[in-house]
Image (tube, rainbow, N blue to C red):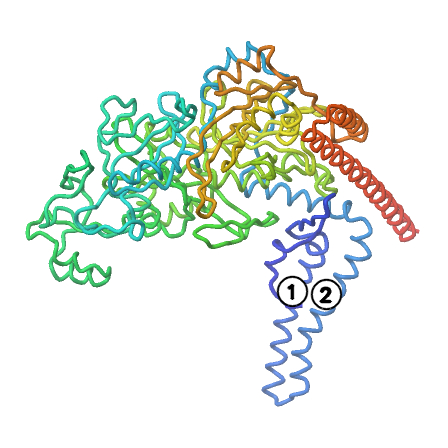
Amino acid sequence: MLTFIKASDILFKTFLTIEDSSGMEMELQGAGLTDATIGVWGYRVFAVVMILAMILAIRFFKKGNGKKTIISLCVIPAYLFILFLVMSIFQAVFVNTNKLDKEKQFISYNITNTKNAYNINIEEKEIENSGTITLEDVDNNRDILDNIVIVSKDAVLKTLEQYQTNVGYYSYTGANIANYNNSLVYVSPREIIGSGERTYENKTYEYTHGYGAIITSATATNEEGQVEYIQSGFVDENSPIKITEPRIYFGLETNDTIIVNSNKGKEYDYPINSYTNAEYSYAGDAGLSLGFLDRLILGITNGDINLAFSGSSNSESRIITNRNIIQRAKKVMPYLLYDEEPYLVVTDEGNLMWVLDAYTTSNSYPYSQSTTIEIDGQKSKINYIRNSVKVIIDAFNGDLSFYITDRNDPIAMSYAKVYPTLFKEKEETIPEDIQKHIVYPEFLYNIQSEMLSRYHNVQPEVLYRNDDIWSIAKSKVNTNTRNKMSAYYTMVKDENENKVGLIIPYTPLNRQNIVSYLVGTYNGENKLVLYKFSSGSNVLGPIQLDTQIEQDETISKELNDLKDTGTRLTRNMIVVPIENTLLYVETVYQEFLNEVEDESQIPVLKKIIVASGNKVAIGNNLNEALDNLLSQYAVKIEVEDEETEEGLIEAIIRANNNLQESSSNQNWEMIGRDLQRLQELIQKLETLKQEELEQENMEQGNSQNILNNEIINNLVIE
């Protein structure tokens, strides 16, 4: 009964528990009918009762009447018990007999407020699937097709770790996608290695900064299937992306306090060759000019006595602290939540700038569903989030600029009023040469996409019955593993303009066909659009496509030829919108396994599989695969409807025919696959029949509850 003491909890408690077809329960948060009527008035009366009871108790206590004092105090728990009893009876007799009818208004509040809290009250476009991609589609969308991401971030980082970390004292912890010169590339900052990675001396005054970035193609590989460099040298006059100030004094790995322009000589800049290094003296504005005593105190505090004795006697010597850009932003504005993956952009002038997404959050938004997020290894529960602030940080000087990008966020605007000199004025927007490289933040997108799996264009009746639940599509990673697809960046058309977009496709819960996909782009502000295929569309899902690929002898043979001893095949699928159809692009990487701890070496791109509509093809590269898809070499596939009883029966018949054919040919590998496929389809049919039976029983139960409720109401009226 202690829960009744906090009246404010009414808006954040669970008022209804619903269950989906898989047995998973979902608790709708907010105040239900009982709390919003009896509960609210009960608490108001309780406030009066508590005050009167305390006044009487004090009066009787002063008079020395202990018995009446205790009776006065007992009124408080007695009232709470009566209130609890009345609310329980009201809930059981009046609400539970027809929950949907009684709680419909409050379910609607939950839907509206959840959408507003997560900023997912977005545009939903219904599209008609146009089927298989055509040559005309290819010609009209060549700019999109040329920018399909076929190189994985994992392949880039493993390549850099293998080939680049032995050149100088640098580390590569990130590879962020960006659009430069209408081509998608990965930008990997070349940062000075942090403490504890590789041992080196003189990090205080000599090895002080990173240098530039390695830029690799996201859309092409070299002839061997490995990462293709666009810019890898320290000085590259032919690079299409000019960097005039490459030095990174502020970044993600710059966690050490340093001295610049010290009496120990110049700083290490970059290696010219195996024997010679370029040197540099810091010419920026960052740092503090401190006397010996201040340097001594700072050296003792940081555990680095070099800070005290490496300073120069002239005014040019400076100490630079707080160089980690996330920690630096937190020092300035600790009340925001900061993204763990800031990214580096190159301005038109050739300067390096970090973009750090910042979020306002709350767990006190009424009627909004809560979710759990994790930042810095700490989990917290929220029910409101906005990406209202972006922090731009100069990698050379460490200057921070806080921009409010969503002025409809009350939390961000409150901070702007409290700290009027910290945030840029409304008229001051992010410079265009930075803004054009900003992408939709993946951290926010993942939260929103999960919420949209239930809270798309949904009505109270649908949410109550859990009739229209989506799940993020799954795809095949390797032979035995199927995982949820991760959100991925690719080029998309946004109002006839090419943008870097985040995409994730949805399937109905416990189904495989794609019903919609979510696109997130940035154009001065975050923008989400949900594209839904019209009802009746049977759009191939990733798992269905993988099944068809494995059943085709031509494609499966090419994949089996890559399965050498000591290797592993890794597959990664993305779905790219082209006009009103979808192009499936699946990369097949071959990885040679090391003997130690089963670690893999650099992934090598071996094949690319593409599919659209009812055709699938394979090639050594994307262009070859697309050419095959539009030619007679394409393999026709049957998109089986596995969501209805009739479709499953037809699929079982086809699977049985395939099994008979493979048995007559004594193809034992295909026999195993066909048998497994047949068993899966039979299991799906059994599950579908069970779900239909449960749904029928539920509807009968609801009908009976409505009938009972009408009888009770009629009796009351009479």
The residue at the far front in this view is 666
Q: Which quadrant does the N terminus fall into?
A: bottom right
Judging by the rendered image, the residue that carries numbered circle 1 is 4
Q: On the image, which quarter does residue 247 sit in?
A: top left
Asked if the residues shown at circle 1 and circle 2 are in contact, with their CB atoms under 8 angstroms apart, the answer is yes
Residue 134 position within the rendered picture, expressed as x and y whole percent measured from the top left: 58, 12
Picture layout, residue 637 above or below residue 514: above
Picture layout, residue 338 above or below residue 245: below
Question: In the rendered view, does 412 fall on the left or right side of 703?
Answer: left
Picture layout, residue 190 above or below residue 620: below
- In this view, the residue in front, 615 or 597, is 597
Q: Tell me the amino acid under the disc marked 1.
A: Phe
Question: In the rendered view, does 256 fall on the left or right side of 92?
Answer: left
> Secondary structure beneath disc 1?
helix
Judging by the rendered image, the residue that carries numbered circle 2 is 84
Residue 225 position within the rendered picture, expressed as x and y whole percent measured from the top left: 43, 26
Q: On the image, which quarter does residue 545 sit in?
A: top right
